[in-house]
Image (spheres, coloured by chain):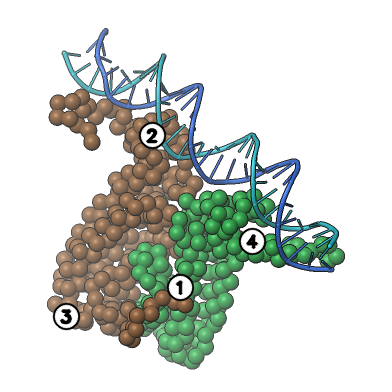
Chain colours: A brown, B green, C cyan, D blue
Amino acid sequence: MESGSSGPTRPVGRGRKAQAAVRAATLAELLDRGYAELTVEGVAQRAGVHKTTVYRRWKDRASLVVDALAEHFAADIPTPDTGAIETDLRALARALAQSMTGPVGRAVQTAMYSDAGRLPEIAEARRRVFADRFRRAEPVITRAIERGELPAETDPVELLKTLAAPIYFRLLVSADPIEEATADQAVRITLAAARAGALVQGSAVAVKAAGADADQP
Amino acid sequence: MESGSSGPTRPVGRGRKAQAAVRAATLAELLDRGYAELTVEGVAQRAGVHKTTVYRRWKDRASLVVDALAEHFAADIPTPDTGAIETDLRALARALAQSMTGPVGRAVQTAMYSDAGRLPEIAEARRRVFADRFRRAEPVITRAIERGELPAETDPVELLKTLAAPIYFRLLVSADPIEEATADQAVRITLAAARAGALVQGSAVAVKAAGADADQP
DNA sequence: TCTCAATGCAACTTCTAGTTGCGATAGGCT
DNA sequence: AGCCTATCGCAACTAGAAGTTGCATTGAGA
């Protein structure tokens, strides 16, 4: 967009500071007013900046929110390999819980599943982050299967969803605080289910008899 | 609210039909535009009604949405008592999954956890519904404990949250379709976890050592 | 058929989104 | 230190949706 090779591409300290303030203010407003009630003027005031300053940097309300969230998309959840499924899953679950901890994490994560999640860019980012996490985490489960720690038919994706579900439940439904204990509990539940053979492939899909009528009347 | 004993309390068929159309249109708009993008004029047009007709019946946008959702709050989830924990839980989970099935159910449930969920009336309704469901479902677990089907220390609330989590995960996070198989899978996971003793009281809370510092730095 | 409550319509006010032109200012560079 | 200019603040706009009001019109029920 910018930075012509010889052009006057000076980052300009003033602008950088203002933009950072606006982004922080956007997350704060997102957290305590929500996307639906977020106003550009409110963000500007909170950032100690004039409304036009916001509009000069961002096309509209949506791209302001998208950009403020985008900063924190970096999934960066690694692929643990401790040699035991329990500690590996604990690392994964704690990393997920961690990403929802603190005002910023909570603001970002809840916003991504609120009405702001309908913005195409957010929806796509969500898909990307999820695909990335599954891709990184899958080896953890396949290795555990190879080691004989889990039933051979265990479905990695199903297991990871089972691991994530109790954590997201706290974030989005029950609004209970999310701590390490939350993650550890999710691990216990998931492992018990996996060892009992409840997470084998196809266990979560309906086995439709022949017939093409899937819609309800 | 209305119906003074001798007053001119005629329900007036025309009004009833218009109101029903507006409520239905509100849910439809909620489903395919979301609360943040929902406009009163949009709802009115969709209902084949003039904007002022909406404002004569509802104070503002918020109460329109609240009222449209309120129709469907009736939790009406019964207390199954089949004599076996598995079938009882299956009944509970399927009833929950059922409430998220079909366009109306999906619209209502997702809206309650979207930005509309920040409206005080919605937040309170959510608490009421949850409290009611837990109250009705708790005997199912205590009976199972008495029958020796579950560990004696099993925490009923923790178990019910574990049961609900995978279903809400599909509704709010993964957006996978919700079917009976989803509910049945949730039952398998929950039972495996409960039987393994992962849902005993206090298993989900951090055991803080003495000290008053709970906030993060 | 006749009535009156409820709707349709137009014309408002207010609020926020988003835009534009100009003068003020502060950060970077010499 | 002092200039240069990109960026900011400010005021004054347009556009659209929220919400309101007065009056004419219509249709369900007695």
A40 relative position to D20: left or right: left
Task: Estimate the spatial distance between the alpha carbons at disc 2 and disc 1, rounded to whole Å.
Answer: 41 Å
Secondary structure state at the residue bearing disc 3: loop
Question: Who comes first in sequence, dot 4 or dot 1?
Answer: 4
Residue type indicated by callout 3 = Gly
Q: Is residue B135 above or below residue A56?
A: below
Task: Estimate the spatial distance between the alpha carbons at disc 1 and disc 3, rounded to whole Å.
Answer: 38 Å
- Which quadrant would residue B205 be assigned to in this image? bottom left
A16 relative position to A149: left or right: right
Task: Estimate the spatial distance between the alpha carbons at disc 3 and disc 4, rounded to whole Å.
Answer: 63 Å
Instruction: Please check whether the numbered discs 1 and 3 fall on a single chain.
Output: no
Q: Is residue A68 above or below residue B105?
A: above
- Which quadrant would residue C22 be assigned to in this image? top left
* Picture coordinates of residue B43, whole percent (x, y): 55, 55
Instruction: Please check whether the numbered discs 3 and 4 fall on a single chain.
Output: no
Which residue is denoted by mark 1 in the rendering? B101
Camera-near label (1 vs 3) is 1
Which residue is denoted by mark 4 in the rendering? B18
Instruction: Please check whether the numbered discs 2 and 4 fall on a single chain.
Output: no
Secondary structure state at the residue bearing disc 2: helix
How many marks the image carries: the answer is: 4
Give neighbour class at mark 4: few <14, some 14-19, many 20+ (Cα, 10 Å): some
Give neighbour class at mark 3: few <14, some 14-19, many 20+ (Cα, 10 Å): few
Which residue is denoted by mark 2 in the rendering? A55
Asked if the residue under mark 3 is in contact with the one under mark 1, i.e. CB atoms within 8 Å, the reply is no
Which residue is denoted by mark 3 in the rendering? A148
* Picture coordinates of residue C16, whole percent (x, y): 50, 39
